[in-house]
Every structure is written in C-alpha cells, then in structure tokens.
Image (spheres, rainbow, N blue to C red):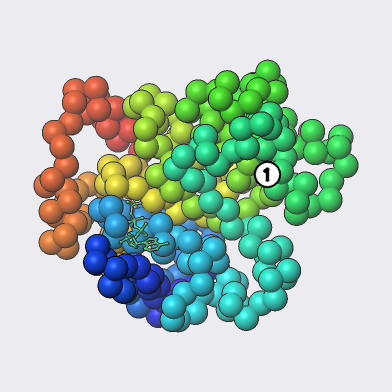
C-alpha cells in the first residue's frame, strides 16, 4: 500500500552560535507497509519516528527518495488529486485537546473530514457520526459537548472517530495513549485493536513503550538516529529483540509498578 524507497529527510536548523546545522531526521531507508497489518514504530525521543510517519502520509516531502501510495509516487501527483487520495491516510496525534477546535462541539469535529472530503446529506452524516460514536463508545450527550468538557480518554476516542470518519486504509497513532492512566490506556489500545478488525485497514502505532508495541503490532520497527535498526515480526516477548540498541532500551525500562505488572499480565492473557 505505502512504499518508501530510499527515503530521507533533512532539516536545516541553527546551533547556539547561529551556525547552520543539518539534521538527518531520517537517513535513507526503504520500507513497505501492507494492507490489514499492524505496525509499531519504537525508538527513543528524537530517533525520527514522527518524521518518518509524516513522510509516509505525505505531510512532509522527502529530501531524497520516493514515497509511493498504491504504486504512485505521491510527489508526482497534482495537489488536488493527492488531497483526495490522501484522505485514505489519517493520523491521530498525541495531544487530543490541541487537535480539536475548542469552539466546536465534538460532533462537528468528527464530521469535519466528511464535510471536507465527501458529499453527504445531513441525515446520512448524522447517522454516520452516531455509528462512529457507538464504535468508540461515546454517548450522544458527549457528542454535543466542547472538547474541554471531556476527559483525556474521551478526547482520544473523539480523535479516533474523526480519523475513521472517512474510512481510511491506514491510520498513524502518534503516542496516542501517553498521558492516560493505565486503565483508560488499556481501553483505548483494545478499542484500536478491535477497530482493526472492524474498519481500520492497517495502522502504525508510534510509541516509546516497547510493551505497548508488543501488545499492539504484528510488525515492530525499531528506530535509532534516523535509521531502522531492527524489525521484529509477531514479537511475543523481550527475547525476540536482538539488536544491541533494542536490548539497551529494554534494559533501561523503569521497574514496573505492581499495578502496571498486573495490567501486563492481563494484556498477555488476552493475546
Ligand atoms: N521541523 C523540524 N525542524 C528541524 N528539526 C526537526 C523538525 N522536526 C523534527 N526535527 C528534528 O528531527 C529529529 C527527529 O525528530 P522526530 O520528531 O521525528 O523524532 P521522534 O522519534 O518522533 O521524537 P519524539 O519521540 O520525541 O516525538 C530530532 O532531532 C528533531 O529535533
């Protein structure tokens, strides 16, 4: 579905003294993402995960290489044409609150992509939003509220419903459960897994948390300093990670609280 061919991304910045600096956010790499597959991208802060995701979605242009969607180089498509095709690719950002218009009831925020990209009469639109709300467990009452009147977990659900509103083939979840308490976190992760079988074609989960990656994804991609250092399929435990950097990341995991460990056991039991 999405193919990256020797793609790289450099940013120009300035150091403390004002000298020009080139940042190799993503070094040349190739990667294919298939339909109906779950991916996780793990790596420390600054390793290039979000930049790589933005390249996949065509939000950023690569410095070199090609990004192809269904075999077509997205850089060669006319903006109008790509805008329509790009709708099949969605992203759920880390900060749910700032991704939503604070003045709009969340019903309208969920409806926004439909209004921009699809022609739908009001009755069908309402029906569609109610179906989506049901899928992500939001009540009709919650749909009429403003973002600041919802909890963090409810806001994540709104963002997921919004991303799903135009039936995307691929959704990137960028740190989508950070900042949530363990119970809500588990609910959101399970919701995404459930939606995978019931709507989302494929997804990429960006996370610092290797436990979350193991729980969520069929394919785990480990990034370090802009490069992919390891790919693990169907990881069942930490032992499946062999690269020195992955091992270091695992060794530096903080000791887990009893509550967290119990949750991991419950997660493992459901796999
Ligand atoms: N617009 C930009 N301009 C300049 N440098 C940037 C820009 N965006 C990202 N970078 C730099 O590129 C590198 C990779 O950043 P990126 O956000 O992709 O990492 P990340 O792995 O997603 O980090 P985090 O987990 O903290 O979100 C970092 O050194 C970052 O400072």
Q: Quadrant of residue 81?
A: bottom right
Is 177 or 187 nearer to us in this picture? 177
Q: Which of 91 and 261 lies nearest the eye of the viewer?
A: 91
Q: In this view, does 53 lie above or below 24?
A: above
Q: Quadrant of ligand 1?
A: bottom left
Q: What element carries label 1?
A: loop
Which residue is label 1 attached to?
165
Say left or right for 151 vs 207: right
Using the rendered image of the protein, determine whether residue 220 is visible from the camera's viewpoint.
Answer: no
Tell me if residue 59 comes above or below residue 40 in the rendering: below
The answer to whether residue 247 is visible is yes
Q: Is mark 1 within 8 Å of ligand 1?
A: no
Asked whether, in this view, residue 169 is left or right of residue 271, the answer is right
Q: Which residue is at a point 28% across and 44% down the rendered structure image?
A: 209
Residue at the farthest top position? 141
Q: In which quarter of the image is the N terminus?
A: bottom right
- Is residue 146 found left or right of 25 in the rendered image? right
Residue 219, percent from left and from top: 36, 57
Residue sitting at x 40%, y 44% = 175
Left or right of 108? Residue 23 is left
Residue under the point 29% across and 60% down: 47
- The percent coordinates of residue 156 (x first, y second) are 51, 34
Q: Which residue lies furthest to the front in this view?
A: 17
| Residue 48, image x, y percentages | 34, 62
**x and y percentages locating residue 178 in the rendered image:** 37, 37
């Amino acid at each position: 579905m999405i193919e990256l061919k020797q793609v790289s991304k450099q940013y120009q910045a300035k150091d403390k003294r004002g000298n020009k600096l080139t940042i190799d956010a993503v070094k040349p790499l190739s990667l294919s993402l298939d339909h109906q597959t779950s991916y996780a991208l793990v790596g420390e802060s600054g390793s290039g995960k979000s930049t790589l995701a933005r390249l996949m979605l065509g939000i950023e242009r690569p410095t070199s290489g090609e990004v192809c969607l269904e075999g077509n180089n997205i850089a060669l498509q006319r903006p109008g044409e790509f805008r329509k095709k790009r709708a099949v690719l969605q992203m759920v950002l880390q900060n749910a609150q700032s991704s939503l218009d604070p003045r709009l009831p969340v019903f309208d925020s969920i409806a926004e992509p439909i209004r921009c990209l699809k022609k739908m009469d009001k009755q069908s639109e309402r029906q569609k939003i109610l179906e989506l709300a049901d899928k992500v467990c939001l009540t009709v009452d919650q749909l009429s509220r403003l973002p600041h009147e919802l909890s963090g977990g409810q806001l994540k659900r709104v963002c997921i419903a919004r991303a799903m509103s135009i039936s995307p083939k691929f959704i990137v979840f960028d740190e989508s459960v950070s900042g949530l308490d363990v119970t809500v976190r588990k609910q959101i992760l399970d919701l995404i897994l459930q939606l995978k079988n019931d709507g989302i074609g494929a997804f990429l989960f960006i996370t610092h948390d290797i436990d979350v990656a193991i729980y969520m994804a069929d394919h785990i991609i480990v990034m370090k300093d802009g490069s992919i250092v390891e790919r693990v399929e169907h990881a069942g435990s930490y032992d499946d990670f062999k690269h020195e950097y992955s091992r270091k990341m695992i060794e530096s995991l903080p000791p887990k609280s009893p509550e967290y460990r119990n949750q991991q056991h419950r997660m493992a039991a459901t796999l």
